[in-house]
């Protein structure tokens, strides 16, 4: 069983479209995250949810909206896609994101290409 | 501004040698520093964590050091193997216990 799974693995779409990426974790963790990895492989946090509540919202355009229906799921919806949104998006989870220890478990990533 | 820099974007070494990767940070006071491995097309995988009051941590062929005075961590892989080829990322906790990642070092072990 995959611990953190995200779908789809690849997403190719046109500018201006709206798309969603889904993430699920079966580790029983309290905290889930979305990261963006750009073409230079730099990994940057976007959002963090602890028990369905938003605890981190880094400087991200409001076209990006996370939704957490329960603590095992954190989906990412993106409106009005732009060329600059092309990147690999990773979902991750940790046992308790409020802990400074904060070891994280990552999904395999979703490669988004905006044409 | 806060920075986490891994000084080599790419590192090539001969099989059997020790690989040493460096992580330097500024304007952070992390309680923990972590190292992750990332293979192409995959997410990062946690390897090791070291606390601020620990000087050194080992796990099999891996060794991590943490010098809070120098604001530096070194990551060593002894007796390196081609299977160790990957990108290695250091990460440390910042405000609100966010995890901030370094720029990564792509290690290639040549047979």
Image (cartoon, rainbow, N blue to C red):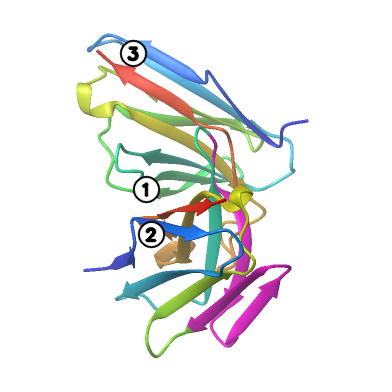
Residue at x 68%, y 75% (from the top left corner):
B58
Report the span colored magenta. B42-66
Choose between B48 and A76: the one closer to the eye. Answer: B48
Which comes sooner in the sequence, label 3 or label 1? 3
Residue located 61% across and 64% down the image: B16
Residue placed under numbered mark 2 in the picture: B102
State the CA–CA distance, disc 1 to disc 2: 9 Å
Instruction: Indicate the quadrant containing the N terminus of chain B: top left, top right, bottom left or bottom right.
Output: bottom left
Determine whether the residue tagged by mark 2 lies in a helix, strand or loop: loop
Predominant secondary structure, magenta span: strand
The location of residue A111, given as percent across then percent down, is 42, 25
Residue A105 vs A84, above or below: the answer is below
Q: Residue furthest right?
A: A1
The chain that hosts pointer 2 is B
* Residue to which mark 3 is pinned: A18
Q: Secondary structure at mark 1?
A: strand
Whether tag 3 and tag 1 are in contact, CB under 8 A, the answer is no
- Place residue A101 in its image quadrant: bottom right
Residue A89 vertical placement versus B3 (above, below): above
Residue at point 53%, 83% (across, down): B52
**Is the residue at mark 2 from the same chain as the one at mark 3?**
no
Disc 2 residue crowd, few under 14, some 14–19, many 20+, Cα 10 Å: many
Which numbered disc, 1 or 2, marks the residue closer to the eye?
A: 2
Spatial CA span between label 3 and label 1: 22 Å
Which residue is depicted at the point 21% across and 22% down? A83
Nearest to the observer: residue A62 or residue A8: A8
Q: Chain of mark 3?
A: A
Per the rendering, the mark at residue A44 is: 1
Residue A67 drawn at (x, y percent): 49, 29
Residue A73 screen position, x and y as percent: 61, 31
């Amino acid at each position: 069983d995959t611990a953190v799974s995200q779908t789809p693995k690849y997403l190719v779409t046109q500018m201006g479209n709206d798309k969603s990426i889904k993430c699920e974790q079966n580790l029983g963790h309290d905290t889930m995250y979305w990261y963006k990895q750009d073409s230079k492989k730099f990994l940057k946090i976007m959002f963090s949810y602890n028990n369905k509540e938003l605890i981190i919202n880094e400087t991200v355009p409001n076209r990006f909206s996370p939704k957490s229906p329960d603590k095992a799921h954190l989906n990412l919806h993106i409106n009005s896609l732009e060329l600059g949104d092309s990147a690999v998006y990773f979902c991750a989870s940790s046992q308790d994101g409020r802990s400074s220890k904060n070891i994280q478990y990552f999904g395999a990533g979703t490669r988004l290409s905006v044409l | 501004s806060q920075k986490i820099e891994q000084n080599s974007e790419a590192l090539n070494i001969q099989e059997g040698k020790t690989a040493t990767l460096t992580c330097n940070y500024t304007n952070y006071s992390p309680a923990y520093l972590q190292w992750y491995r990332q293979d192409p097309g995959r997410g990062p995988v946690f390897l090791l964590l070291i606390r601020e009051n620990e000087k050194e941590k080992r796990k099999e062929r891996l060794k991590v050091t943490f010098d809070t005075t120098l604001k530096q961590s070194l990551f060593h892989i002894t007796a390196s193997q081609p299977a160790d080829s990957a990108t290695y990322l250091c990460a440390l906790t910042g405000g609100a216990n966010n995890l901030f990642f370094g720029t990564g070092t792509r290690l290639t072990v040549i047979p």
